[in-house]
Image: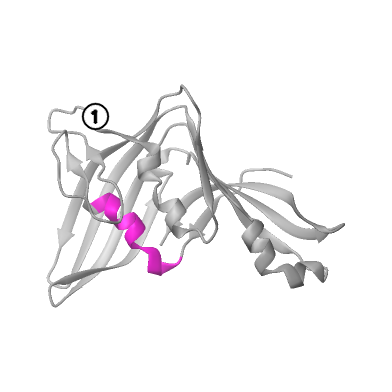
Amino acid sequence: MKGPIASSLHIARGLLAAAVGLALTATAGGSDAPSLLTGPTLRLHDSRGRAGDNAVADFMYFVPLISLAPVSVATEPGVEHRLRLVSITRRVKLESFVVTAHFEFVGQGRQQNTFDWTNAALRHAAKLKGGGKLERSLAAINVQGSGKGIIEVEGKTTNGVQTVDEVRLRFNAHGHASPVSIDLHDIDYREGEFHALNEIVARVNTLTF
């Protein structure tokens, strides 16, 4: 059974740097700036309002980094689907900082990050062969169509070193429905083979690191 479910997806805090690079390495217009090792540099609108378009794959690059399983990335060929970073604000205090970035998905394309569930099945082979089941395993993360979102990064500064505590990606900002969804399925063992079943599609409003 498939159906949209409002949801929030939480990821281990140890992989925060995967998303932080998006907010902290963005550049204005066509100018270049040094990239962090954590990911690509995304371009902002410039001061004259010209769009700094970015590939959706550049924005979603953290998905393979947070996965314990191999990830394959597929995009809809021949369809323009981009991401625009609209603005970034930074509030820096003596012992803390907050970075907020507004963005929008533009176009009607689709990107899907599909997770190979074979490793998960093998790790839990004894349980599955004993009649157990892995419930709601992550099968894919999808971005389809347009929408607006906000990245919020909060952290502390200790002895001059900035450390991120939390990153929140909101995909349903400004009253727009989220274009991000996840596919979930159960995994069991029958007739000598592992099987994926009971697929559910859940719409993601917030991704929290």
Quarter of the figure with residue 69: bottom right
Q: Quadrant of the C terminus?
A: bottom left
Q: Quadrant of the N terminus?
A: top right
Disc 1 residue type (three-letter): Ala
- Residue 206, given in percent of the width and then of the height, sits at 45, 53
Question: Which residue sits at x=37%, y=57%?
Answer: 168
Which percent across, then down, holds residue 79?
45, 23
Identify the magenta region.
12-23
Asked if 175 appears above or below 136 in the picture, the reply is: above
* Farthest-out residue, right: 191
Q: Is residue 45 left or right of residue 71?
A: left
Q: Is residue 16 magenta?
A: yes
Query: Tag count in the figure?
Result: 1
Mark 1 — residue? 51
Q: Is residue 61 above or below residue 49?
A: below
Residue at 50% across, 29% down: 76
Q: Nearer the viewer, residue 62 or 69?
A: 69
Q: Is residue 170 above or below residue 155?
A: above
Find residue 66 and report its horizontal and vertical position in percent.
45, 59
Relative to 203, 170 lies left or right: left
70 inside magenta stretch: no
Nearer to me, 156 or 80: 80
Residue drawn at the location 19% of the way across and 27% of the way down: 50
The part of the image, by quadrant, that contains residue 190 is bottom right
As drawn, the residue found furthest toward the top would be 78
Where disc 1 sits, the SS reads loop
Q: Residue furthest bottom?
A: 159
Which x, y percent locates residue 75?
A: 49, 33
Main SS type for the magenta part? Answer: helix
The 10 Å Cα crowd at callout 1, few under 14, some 14 to 19, many 20 or more, is: some
